[in-house]
Amino acid sequence: MSGSSSADDKRKAERILSFLEDKYGGISWWPGDTGEVMIGAILTQQTRWENVKKALALLQEKDLCSVPAIHTAAPEDIENAIRCTGFYRMKARRLLGLAAYVMDTCGGIGRMESMPTEELRAGLLSVNGVGEETADSILCYGFSRPSFVIDAYTVKIAACAGIKTPRPGLKALFESVLPKDTSAYSQAHARIVEYAKERCTTKRCEECRILALNG
DNA sequence: GACCAGGTCCTTG
DNA sequence: CAAGGACATGGT
């Protein structure tokens, strides 16, 4: 009866993406240079973007909003600036670890720009505190590489839509129905978050289910 | 006061 | 491997 559930999931993913494209059109998201994206990617872990923006502004005031600056900064200075994002002690450590990796291991952001995407991704994942979502955010928004970001909102929408693919497979699923293009990936992700922020605030999230049904 | 936020790591069973 | 806890502040 049912064909491969993978094909079924692809169809649902296509419907969602096409609906969101009609609804939001082209939206830009996560402006900032590569270093600022890296910092923001750590700060936004389990945290609202509103608070991340405040922290980034405080870092900028202290000239700490760049990877080289973080690399040589005192932990307390970083902590004081990012306190409003929560988990500030751990995040300060993670920022320092990431900065050390970028500056000492890679030799700076410029060197990383010439690395193949897979190598770059593996390198980022080797840093403590950088998981899949953080790495893909940095790749997509910071290095303009086509690596689709799966976050809590994407997982939630996929679940509501009746997509059966387990989380580890969602990245490949969405990448398979989108053109392999950084802009396509980043905009699709931005639309998902925009939609989920306003609609998926309840546990039920009936809207997404209906969306997948009606396409 | 309870509950959640654009995760990740570490420890246990 | 799955499940549970820790990390911490700020808004509803």
Image (tube, coloured by chain):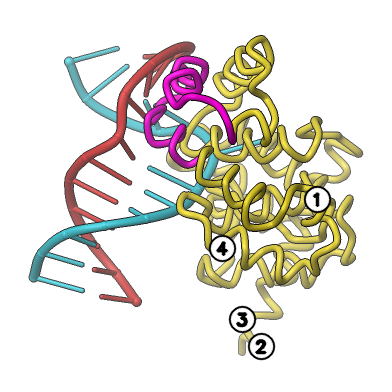
Chain colours: A yellow, B cyan, C red
Chain for numbered disc 4: A
Give amino acid for label 2.
Gly
Mark 1 and mark 2: span between their CA atoms? 38 Å
Dot 1 crowding, Cα within 10 Å, few <14, some 14–19, many 20+? many
Q: Mark 3 is on which residue type?
A: Ser
Q: Chain of mark 1?
A: A
Q: Quadrant of the C terminus of chain A?
A: bottom right
Looking at numbered disc 4 in the image, what kind of residue is underneath it?
A: Gly
| Residue at the disc numbered 4 | A162
Q: Quadrant of residue A55?
A: top right
Mark 1 sits on what residue? A143
Write down the residue under mark 2: A3
Of the image marks 3 and 1, the number of the one nearer the N terminus: 3
Whole-number angstrom distance, CA of label 4 to CA of label 2: 15 Å
Q: Which residues are magenta?
A: A71-94
Mark 3, residue position:
A5
> Are callouts 3 and 4 both on one chain?
yes
| Pointer 3 with pointer 4, Cβ within 8 A | no
Lower sequence index among marks 4 and 2: 2
Tag 3 secondary structure: helix
Identify the mark nearer the N-term, 4 or 1: 1
- Give residue A65's position: percent from left, percent from top: 67, 25
Q: Do tags 3 and 2 sit on the same chain? A: yes
Viewer-proximal residue among B9 and A150? B9
